[in-house]
Image: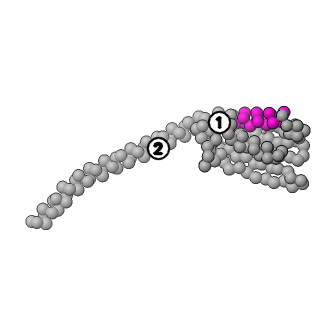
Amino acid sequence: MAGQTTSRRVTLTNMGSGKEAADRLKQQAAERQQKLNESFKRGMQIDQNRQGNWDALLAALRTNVEEFTESFPPAKSQQLGASLLNPNNLTVSTQVQPIIKIEVLRDYRESGVQADITRQKGWDFTQSRTPVYAFTVDGFSDGQRSFTPKELAAELFAFIEEFFG
């Protein structure tokens, strides 16, 4: 009989713990659902802002190139310009040697943009590639830092400045 009393006390004690465990699991499920809803909402906002962020990046980069070309005679003599080759490719390049060519590409698979950079030094050419800058609600991110379209344009324009420096 003593054994029955002990097991009954354990059962009564665990009943309070069971309710607490159920409440805890319900809370965790609600938190997971809220995170899922927030993630879905953020994804929708990124999709809605993707074209606007791309357009703002292109406009800012083209403005930087035009202002630089008009204000810096060596850039003008090398015919530095920015051309939209198709809706997903802006190419910034010189037409006279030595050349620099930056192709800013919108990549739908990665949901972001990336730049391929070709530079001429003497007779040699070097090629490099930036990381993929993923679209965000407010612009772009390389996974460590966030950029507005103007900030990313400045980041990419730094390659032009370095080339002419």
Q: Which residues are magenta?
A: 57-70
Please tell me which of labels 1 and 2 falls first in the chain.
Answer: 2
Residue at 87% over, 55% down: 124
The image quarter in which residue 66 lies: top right
Residue at 79% over, 41% down: 92
| Residue 9 percent coordinates (x, y) | 16, 59
Q: Residues within 10 Å of mark 1 (few under 14, many from 20)?
A: many
In front: mark 1 or mark 2?
1
Give the CA separation, mark 1 to mark 2: 24 Å
Q: Is residue 33 left or right of residue 5?
A: right
Q: Is residue 67 magenta?
A: yes
Residue at 60% over, 35% down: 49
- What residue would you read off at disc 2? 36
Q: Amino acid at mark 2?
A: Leu
- What residue would you read off at disc 1? 53
- Local SS, label 1: helix
The chief SS type of the magenta part is helix
| Circle count | 2
Q: Is residue 56 magenta?
A: no
Q: Nearer the viewer, residue 142 or 107?
A: 142
Residue at 84% over, 33% down: 70
Q: Amino acid at mark 1?
A: Asn
- Local SS, label 2: helix
